[in-house]
Amino acid sequence: MQVQQENIKIEKTVATAFFAKGFLSIDSQTHHFHSSFFYFPLLSSTALAAIIALLWPPITRHAPSKAIKAAFRLSPFFTLAAAILLVSISSAPSLAAGALTLIFALIQSLYACWVNRKFNFTSKIFSASLALVPAKISLLITLSVLTGAIFCCFCIAGIGGATATGTNLDKLFIFLILLSLTWTMHVIKNTLQVAISSTTYKYFKLGLDRVDDVMAAFADSVKHSMGNVCIGSALVPVLCLIRGSGRAVSLGAGDTDEMMFSCASCYSGLTDRLVMCANRWAFVQVGISNKGFIQSSGDVWELFRRAGLERVIDTDLTSAFCFLCGTTGAALCALLGGSWALAMHNQHATEVAIYAYLIGYFLVRVAMAWPQGCVSGYYVAYAENPQSRHFDSTVQDRIRELARSQ
């Protein structure tokens, strides 16, 4: 405990130094750095990100089908627009970033065409899991997004201070600030997911007549589950990336070349087994029983296996939908920040666009912990008690449909 407190003190000291440096640079201008050209676009993008983040969850709850179609259609479009903006900046880094963003937009478009038949089932799951709103959920999401936005503003100040001087050491500082931003936003999002998913789970599993106060569940998560949340925040993104690469390799290999197919099948099987070590569904068990994250991952996947939900979970689009909501907001923020900086002939327009993109993505993902947490709690509760009176035939119909398609 003493070591942990000392580490926290060191982190606070370092963060305070960078943020103070950034604030001092607001009034300063050099030949290479104009503070107003840097800060105003990013602060405006942060405000836009917060607004978009607060809009997505209620839209998803009240019109899930339209929200799903909007995310899968708008994200490639705005990502393409962001790619065009980056290319128009016409610097070597912006051209490289623009090319990667263009490829990303193309991948999103192809993926949307590939999975559009699954929209209907995902819409039904959202309608079922979001039917009853936990008490004070809107307040919790609003406060979380505002907290995230304030933290983003401090990060912008720190990045601006490092950009103003522009030494090689300052580039390392910028990287560390971005790493801190990524880590903090993941922890906020996953703490929300623990609280929301455990509240939803209790409603469906125990057959309650009302949903518990999610603010109390959030306080319990902060008090008892932060260690597991931090472990999950580090493991889940990495293992999801590995598992996704395994599926991509399997699809790309096909079955024409026996050697390639065998290697791809082996790699895909290995990555699929990693889901037993870390998955986002484990956050439900973390909130309910305060188990270790890795143990919770294995236990919850075993529940899905016994209930015959593995294929249903694998074909679920909730995670992809929340991701594309994030990229939609990210691209819009990049367009605002980048075009503003470009209009002012700011040589840091590329960096502004990239920072705005990251801020937009993370803030929207914080807000989307609401629908994602509800769906997670719904599936885990179903796996434990499919006969609960709160469940309709949506999941059973999906299981039968997938069985017929084998």
Image (spheres, grey):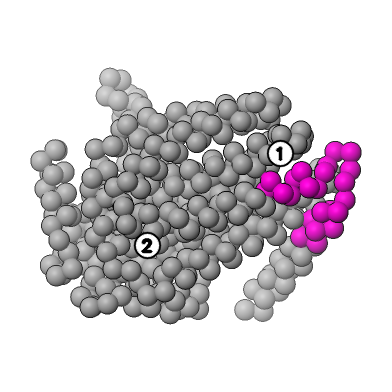
Dot 2: within a 10 Å radius of its alpha carbon, few (fewer than 14), some, or many (20 or more) residues? many
Mark nearer the N terminus (2 vs 1): 1
The residue shown at (51%, 35%) is 79
The residue shown at (85%, 58%) is 24
Specify whether residue 137 is painted magenta.
no
The span picked out in magenta is 19-42
Label 2, secondary structure: give it: helix
What's the distance in space between the residues labelled 2 and 1, CA to CA? Answer: 37 Å
Location of the N terminus (image quadrant):
bottom right
In the picture, the disc for residue 102 is: none
Label 1, secondary structure: give it: helix
Location of the C terminus (image quadrant):
top left
The type of residue carrying mark 1 is Ala
Mark whose residue sits in front, 2 or 1: 1
Dot 1: within a 10 Å radius of its alpha carbon, few (fewer than 14), some, or many (20 or more) residues? many
- Residue 161 or residue 70, whichever sits in front: 70
Judge left or right: residue 59 versus residue 187.
Answer: left
The residue shown at (73%, 49%) is 39
The type of residue carrying mark 2 is Gly
Where residue 31 sits in the image (x, y, percent)?
Answer: 89, 38
Q: Would you name the residue on which mark 2 appears?
A: 373
- Residue 77 or residue 102, whichever sits in front: 77
Where residue 364 sits in the image (x, y, percent)?
Answer: 50, 53
Where residue 157 sits in the image (x, y, percent)?
Answer: 74, 55
Residue 119 in view? yes
In the picture, the disc for residue 341 is: 1
Q: Main secondary structure of the magenta part?
A: helix
- Residue 187 or residue 38, whichever sits in front: 38
Residue 339: which quarter of the image? top right
